[in-house]
Image: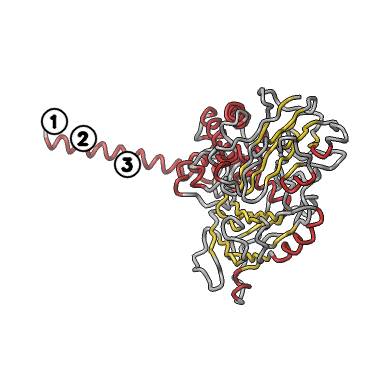
């Protein structure tokens, strides 16, 4: 064993050898710096660390999770782009932060959203809340007329309501603020409503009692007003937020298979500050390039990673289709579970996706429920090749505080159906014109061809192929919400 002096000599020698080695390394680095800089200018950049940091299997799993999470956001963006951005789109309504009224009910020509209602003329506001809040004015509305303002954030959560059920028909002024607004409720404002996202959507529904009532609806719509908070306060406007360079959306069918879906999701997430409970989730998404700073580029994916991303999308649809078959088509779950606030859905992103796929912008259950029928009473899928009856027994009309309707949708597009009598639904306002059964109930004839002139008053025309029926109950009574009252099922004739 060496002495203490010997140890000192050995350590000193080792230090000298390390010093010589470091000097040599530094010399080599300094000599090659110029060449390295030149090489950096002429070579392709390395793959982004997000792609390199995950295996294809991990990327596939993350893509599946992100697709289920993000489908409602991407589909919402598709609708808002057509409504408020693309002036060449036939569905274009007008610019952001203004109200756009449609003084008619929807027809088969209106295809931007799935399962549109044809009961209530719509009004719409695309809200860009980055600069300042908006003040929404609602006029007094007659007590027997239902109306609602549905506030939808970028996640498609219904985060607030104004209307007959929640605030009454007396009118008022409501301040809609984004996630970064720190102000207090100004004098003259009934309520401050806060969105978790910087871009939001307000969908107005105003009840129409019949064709002759359209003029009254137009008067009400003209009383709906929207203004920036600075205008309401008669103050100078704040500096505007930077203009948004909107990216073109994918078509509805492209959203199902194109990896560019994640470019749209990446864009939408920029306007959705991370929620505290989703920090870990968003960190996982960042591993494939999804995040507030952007970075996902479908064209830059390696073939192996592209296959993984596409596989994740296919896995998401496989899970959804199995869920729909087992839970939705059987009636076990429905709109009451799929729409609501963030707190209502409790992080169940498959439920949120189901709501967007089956009928984006559906109402929260307290506002409306939508018992849907994809199958007949025997469990067979509905098709225009057959004839059906849909019967409300005596005393068993849908229990509502407002009104109800039964609407026909062709599948798989979930759109209204062209037909020779231009009837897309049967609703409670039509009861005086329907022929009642001998016991006081009502039978609706659901088929492609006319059931005959004597039954045509009760005919709901179907397409030639597959279809679904959606029963809407606006402002449902407790019996409808707690399951005491059950919606009928179509019976094959």
Image location of residue 80, percent across then percent down: 68, 51
- Horizontally, is 45 left or right of 275 in the view? right
For the question of whether residue 91 can be seen, the reply is yes
Image marks 2 and 1: residues in contact by CB distance under 8 Å? yes
Closer to us: 484 or 441: 441
Residue 438 placement: quadrant: top right
Image location of residue 232, percent across then percent down: 61, 72
Q: Which residue is mark 1?
A: 2
- Give the structural element (helix, strand or loop) at label 1: loop
Identify the mark at residue 193; answer none if there is no mark: none
Q: Residues within 10 Å of mark 3 (few under 14, many from 20)?
A: few
Find the distance from the CA under tag 2 to the CA under tag 1: 9 Å
Closer to the chain start, of discs 3 and 1, is 1
Q: Which residue is mark 2?
A: 10
Q: Residues within 10 Å of mark 1 (few under 14, many from 20)?
A: few
Closer to us: 253 or 213: 213
Q: Which residue is mark 3?
A: 19
Find the distance from the CA under tag 2 to the CA under tag 3: 14 Å
Report the quarter where the N terminus lies. Answer: top left
Image marks 3 and 1: residues in contact by CB distance under 8 Å? no
């Amino acid at each position: 064993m060496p002495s203490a002096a010997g140890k000192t000599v050995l350590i000193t020698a080792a230090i000298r050898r390390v010093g010589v080695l470091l000097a040599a390394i530094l010399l080599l680095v300094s000599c090659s710096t110029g060449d390295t800089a030149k090489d950096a200018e002429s070579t392709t950049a390395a793959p982004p660390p997000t792609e390199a940091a995950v295996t294809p299997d991990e990327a596939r799993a993350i893509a599946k999770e992100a697709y289920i999470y993000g489908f409602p956001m991407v589909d919402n963006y598709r609708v808002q782009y057509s409504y408020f951005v693309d002036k060449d789109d036939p569905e274009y309504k007008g610019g952001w932060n203004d109200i756009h009224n449609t003084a008619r009910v929807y027809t088969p020509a209106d295809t931007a959203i799935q399962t549109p209602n044809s009961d209530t003329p719509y009004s719409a506001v695309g809200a860009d809340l980055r600069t300042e809040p908006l003040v929404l004015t609602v006029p007094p509305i007659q007590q027997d007329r239902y109306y609602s303002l549905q506030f939808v954030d970028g996640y498609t959560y219904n985060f607030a309501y104004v209307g007959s059920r929640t605030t009454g028909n007396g009118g008022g002024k409501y301040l809609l603020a984004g996630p970064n607004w720190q102000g207090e409720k100004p004098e003259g404002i009934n309520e401050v409503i806060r969105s978790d996202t910087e871009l939001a959507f307000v969908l107005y529904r105003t009840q129409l009692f019949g064709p002759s009532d359209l003029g009254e609806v137009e008067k009400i719509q003209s009383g709906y007003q929207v203004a920036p908070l600075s205008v309401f306060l008669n103050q100078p406007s704040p500096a505007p937020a930077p203009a948004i360079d909107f990216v073109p959306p994918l078509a509805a069918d492209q959203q199902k298979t194109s990896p560019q879906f994640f470019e749209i999701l990446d864009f939408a997430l920029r306007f959705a500050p991370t929620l505290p409970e989703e920090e870990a989730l968003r960190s996982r998404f960042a591993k494939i390039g999804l995040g507030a700073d952007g970075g996902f580029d479908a064209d830059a994916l390696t073939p192996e990673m592209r296959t993984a991303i596409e596989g994740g999308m296919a896995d998401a649809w496989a899970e959804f289709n199995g869920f729909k078959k087992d839970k939705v088509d059987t009636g076990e779950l429905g709109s009451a579970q799929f729409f609501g606030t963030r707190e209502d859905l409790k992080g169940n992103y498959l439920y949120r996706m189901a709501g967007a796929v089956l009928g984006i912008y559906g109402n929260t259950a307290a506002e409306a429920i939508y018992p849907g029928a994809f199958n007949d009473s025997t469990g067979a899928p509905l098709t225009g090749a057959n004839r059906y009856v849909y019967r409300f027994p005596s005393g068993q009309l849908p229990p509502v505080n407002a009104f109800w309707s039964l609407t026909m949708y062709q599948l798989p597009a979930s759109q209204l159906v062209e037909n020779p009598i231009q009837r897309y639904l049967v609703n409670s306002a039509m009861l005086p014109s329907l022929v009642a059964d001998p016991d006081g109930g009502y039978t609706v004839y659901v088929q492609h061809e006319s059931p005959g002139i004597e039954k045509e008053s009760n005919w709901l025309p179907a397409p030639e192929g597959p279809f679904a029926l959606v029963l809407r109950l606006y402002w449902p009574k407790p019996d409808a919400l707690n399951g005491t009252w059950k919606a009928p099922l179509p019976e094959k004739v």
